[in-house]
Amino acid sequence: MEFKAELILILLTAIWGGTFALIKGALDYASPLVFVSIRFGIAALILLPFVYKQFKGLTRQQILDGLLIGWWFFPGFILQTVGLQYTTASKSAFITGTFVIFTPIAQMVIMKKLPTLVNTIGIGIAGVGILLLSSGDGDVVSVLSELGSTFNFGDLLTLICAMSFSIYIVYLDVVTKRNNYLYATFSQLAFTTVAALILMPVFHFTGVERVMFELNNELIFAFIYTIFFATLFNITMMTKYQKEVPPVKAAILYSFEPIFAALIAYLLLDERFTTLGFIGATIIFTGLIITEVFRKEETADG
C-alpha cells in the first residue's frame, strides 16, 4: 500500500508542476486572492454533494481537525504567490523548496518522532538538488549570494509559506488517520475559500494586492485545469493516500514538483532546462532512490 501511495503522490506532483505555467499566465488577468477564491470555492461546491453526509454527528475534535489542516493549508497557496511580487523566481523556488528541510523538524515537534537516518540523508540530498534546480542560468553561489544580500518582504512570505507547508504535511498525516478523507478534503477547500474572501478586501484597501479579474480563454483554461485536476483530484488523493507514507518521505516525494514544473516549462514555454537544473533533478531523484532502497530500515524504525 505504501508503494502505491508513493506512486500516487509522485503523480500529484506532476500535475502540480503543470500549474506553474498556467497560473503564471492567469495572474495577468486575475489577482492571486481572486484566483484562489474562485479555484477553491468552485472545487468545494463540486465536492459538497459527495461529502455533506459526513457533517451529521461531527464531533468537536473532527471540527477542530478540519480547521487545523485548513489553517496550515491556506498559507502555502497564497503566500508564495504574493511573495513572487516582491522577489525573484530563483529565490522563490529555492526558499519554497526548504519545506523539505522543515518537515522533519515539524515531525519532531508535532509527532515527537525523529526521522530515520535514511530519510534524513534523503532530505539532505533533496535539499542540495533543489538548490541546483533553483539556480537557473546562474550558479549556486549567485543564488546563495542573492538570497543573503537582498532578503526582503517577499522572501519572508515565501519562507513562511515553506514552514506552513511542512507543518501541513505533518498535520495531514495526523488528521487523516482519524477522519474521513472527503471531509478532510472539503475542510481544506472551504477554509481556503473563506480565508481568501476575507483577506481580499483587506489586501485591496491596504495596497498589498489590488483586486483584478478579466475573464478570457486563458483564464478559463487555467481554472478548468486547477479546479478539476490540481485541486479536486490532487487534494482528494493527497488527503486519502499521504497517511500511508511517513511525512518526511512524503516531503521528498513532493520535492519532485519543481522538476516537473521545469520540464513542463521547457516543453510549453520554451524555457531552458539548464545543466545545473538537470544535475539538481538527478540529485533529487537519487535522494528518493536511497530512501526506497533502504525502505526496510525505515519500516523497522517506524
Image: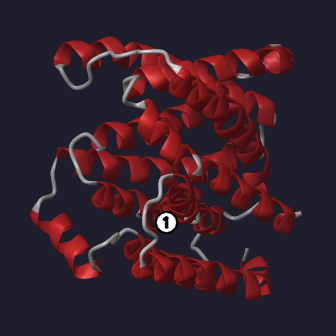
Give x and y (percent) for residue 180. Answer: 81, 34
Q: Is residue 92 left or right of residue 20?
A: left
Q: Secondary structure at mark 1?
A: helix
* Residue at the image point whose x is 41% and y is 35% from the top: 78
Q: Residue at x 57, y 24 (%)?
A: 39
Instruction: Judge left or right: residue 121 versus residue 52.
Output: left
Q: In front: 266, or 254?
A: 266
Screen quadrant of the C terminus: bottom right
* Residue placed furthest toward the left: 149
Q: Position of residue 170 (x, y in %)?
A: 59, 53
Residue 137 visible in the picture: yes
Q: Residue at x 43, y 67 (%)?
A: 272
- Quadrant where the N terminus sits is bottom right
Q: 10 Å neighbourhood of mark 1: few (<14), some, or many (≥20)?
A: many
Q: Which residue is mark 1?
A: 100
Which color scheme does this rendered protein use? secondary structure
Q: Is residue 117 above or below residue 302?
A: below
